[in-house]
Image: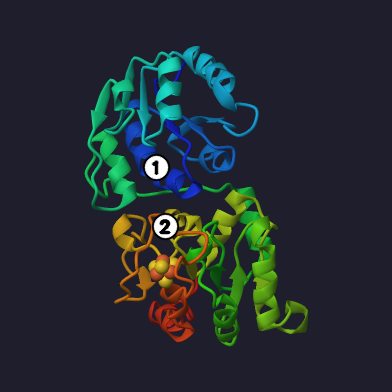
Amino acid sequence: MSAATLVIQTAFLGDVVLTTPLLSALSARHGPVDVVTTPVAAPLLETHPAVRTVIPYEKRGRDRGWAGLRRLGGRLKSERYERAYLPHRSLRTATLALLARIPSRIGFSGPWSFLYTDSRPKSRTGHEADRLLALANEAPGAYAPHLRPTPADEGAAAALVAEPFVALAPGSIWGSKRWPYYAALAAKLAAHVQVVVIGGKDDLELGAEIVAAVGPPALGGRVVSACGRLTLRESAALIGRATALVTNDSAPLHLATAMGTPVVALFGPTVTEFGFGPMRAGDVALGVDGLLCRPCSSHGPPQCPLGHHRCMRELTVAAVFAAIEDMGALRRRR
Ligand code: SF4
């Protein structure tokens, strides 16, 4: 039997995590949904209880170009979906739903909404997770971001570190969003608690710098770098085991929200008012107030356009450490 509902979400990883409340709402209404998403995000959704099937769309690989789009559209057409929800405003997404001949296509108003059968205005305020959830006419907070790693994922995370720890996620694909003092913070934290660095293969160097600042585990340094050692879902499981996650305005923030882990989020060129801040009670967002240049872009430029990067450099280790301490993460057991 075909799942009646398809969701197409091929935006960044964090956006996919923030789409999970919409998936939950649609599943409650229509039954588990099928999702077209990026190959990177696919494993995260494969184990989500609201999802029946994940269809990876390799828009830069085998599905690239018009031929790839048509091929995928044909495959989706054979599934005879009744409705498609299109939270990502993109021509490619709108075209894919059209090629799949899905009779009801629901998305946000924008340049491509003439390709939808039902377009709804997207709120400029509130959290992005709630703005996306509104596509299903649900009230803010009706469903929360959620991920479900498998027992095997949990086992891999548990094998890496057994004692309570604070996790640090120092990476970001946007250079100006990276707080430059994670190594100093780790050295200070390690006097009180085990520290674990979270990241992918691109963050290996950052992880090594932080380990060097604390001192290698073999010599008693209370730090482990998990960078490049775990799959994305195992990393979500690891974040779920932390007493707190310190992160930039990037995907790990949303992974922590979905895993129920307390967050200290560090905002530089962006601000929480954009709708991508922490969501849960007790979470903390820190940023430098009173900078006339801040915010300077919706994503954060690769480098500070003014060269001084004050939005991040003036956020002190002491302030971040105090936030971690105040939320009780140095004494809490998960
Ligand atoms: S221009 Fe201002 S807000 Fe933007 S990166 Fe530089 S210091 Fe930060």
* In the depicted structure, whether residue 203 falls above or below residue 313: above
Res. 195 in view: yes
* In the depicted structure, whether residue 109 falls above or below residue 289: above
For the residue pair 259 and 182, the one nearer the viewer reads as 182
Q: CA distance from mark 2 to mark 1?
A: 12 Å
Q: In the image, what residue type sits under mark 1?
A: Thr
2 and 1 marks in contact (CB < 8 Å)? no
Q: Name the residue located 36 percent from the left edge and 68 percent from the top edge.
A: 283
User: Total label count?
Assistant: 2
Res. 266 in view: no
Q: Name the residue located 54 percent from the left edge and 42 percent from the top edge.
A: 41
Give percent across and percent down for residue 3: 43, 21
Give percent across and percent down for residue 74: 52, 14
Give percent across and percent down for residue 192: 55, 85
Q: Nearer the viewer, mark 2 or mark 1?
A: 1
**The quadrant where residue 61 appears:** top right
Q: Secondary structure at mark 2?
A: helix
**Is residue 109 rendered to the left or right of residue 161?**
left
Residue at the far front in the pictured view: 306
Q: Name the residue located 35 percent from the left edge and 49 percent from the top edge.
A: 144
Badge number at residue 19: 1
**The quadrant where residue 66 appears:** top right
Badge number at residue 257: 2
Q: Secondary structure at mark 1?
A: loop
Q: In the image, what residue type sits under mark 2?
A: Thr
Report the colour scheme.
rainbow
